[in-house]
Image (cartoon, rainbow, N blue to C red):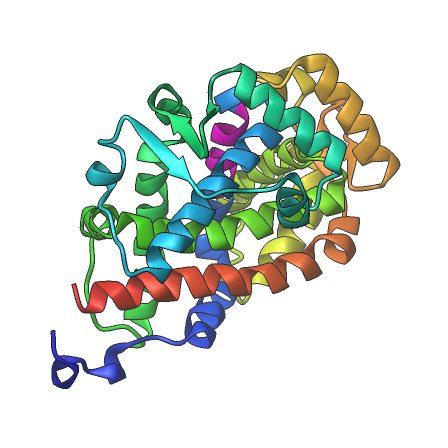
Amino acid sequence: MSLQQIDLSKTLSDEQVYNCLMENYAGLGKDWISHQWNWINSVYWAFNDHYKYMIVISLVEKTMQFYNQMNIQYSYDEYYSKSYLQIEKFSITELCEKLKLPKETVRRKVLELEKDGVISRSKKKIIIDRKAFGFIKPQNQIKFTSKYIHLVSQELNKNKIYSKKLDPKQIENVIKKNFTLCWDWFYRMQIPLIIGYNYIFDDLTTFHIWGTLTMNQAFNFKKNFDSENIHTLQPSYMTFNEITLGKIGSSTGISAMSISDMTNIPRATVIRKCKYLIKHDLIKTNEKKQYVLTKLNHEKIVPYQKESFKQKAKFIRKVLNLLVFS
């Protein structure tokens, strides 16, 4: 496609996408929380260890970034047709800086991944073996992500900000066709976002449990939003949080057993992490002895989310602009 054929007036800015996300959060929030919860579940289920997965995808992202810098691009099928993935050289220190984890933790997890046969060294090469592809291939995640991007595009269509009409399958096909490019964008959004939560909650298991409670209350928000006739409220990000944490939170909790069943995190671990969250006033128990969020989430979590959503807007903007010319 020549430069003369590109109509830049049809492209989006980060600010346009960000404003759309924040102003329409009552409609988009539940789906985003579901998107993120499904992703963090897949992170844990791969190795029953969040950090091992984060290390592996950090190495994959580094290699994808190199491909993009060299203008090399692989489709989803091309990328995973190989017998192994060669990854760029890395150092423990580099991974520690990227993931903001202690050196001893990263070194131990890397050794465990090598022992499990996920990462191996062949002379000067570092590779991810084909048998590990089932853990890291984002087959379902691409579908979840495409669905969410489609919902955002519909809101942009309604506001006449984005003219192209899309469907989830069309988005999925373009992401798969431009896989190493698009998934590098995805990891650049997702890895820092999740590591930010690791800093807030002290570990990713605690964040995973908190996220499960958040999803439960977000789905109950949707029920109350429909039944209590609160459509007159501005369906913005702040409105969503005020209703989720205020009107709904006290009556729509979830038990430790249910959290364990939903996440595969052992029940004893769930109870221990919930005690930590209660101590820091991020969750509480209701009259049914179920766990619910507290209003302190407004002060501690909401400012981080508002800032991190700028990276989400950047990722969505890049994909939607790519779709304009696909």
Please indicate whether residue 164 sits to the left or right of residue 127 in the image. Answer: left
Q: 9 or 134: nearer the eye?
A: 134
Residue 237 in percent (x, y) is at 57, 61
Quarter of the image that includes the C terminus: bottom left
Residue 192 in percent (x, y) is at 58, 52
Quarter of the image that includes the N terminus: bottom left
Please indicate whether residue 192 sits to the left or right of residue 137 in the image. Answer: right
Q: 224 or 212: nearer the eye?
A: 212
* 105 over 191 or under it: above or below: above
Q: 136 or 289: nearer the eye?
A: 136
Instruction: Answer whether residue 305 is visible to the viewer in this image.
Output: yes
Q: Residue at x 69, y 42 (%)?
A: 198
Please indicate whether residue 172 sits to the left or right of residue 234 in the image. Answer: left
Q: Residue at x 20, y 39 (%)?
A: 78
Rendered image quadrant of residue 248: top right
Q: Is residue 37 magenta?
A: yes
Q: 135 or 316: nearer the eye?
A: 135
Residue 124 in percent (x, y) is at 46, 34
* 43 over 146 or under it: above or below: above
Q: Residue at x 70, y 61 (%)?
A: 303
> Overall secondary structure of the magenta stretch?
helix
Residue 41 in percent (x, y) is at 51, 29
- Range of residues picked out in magenta: 36-44
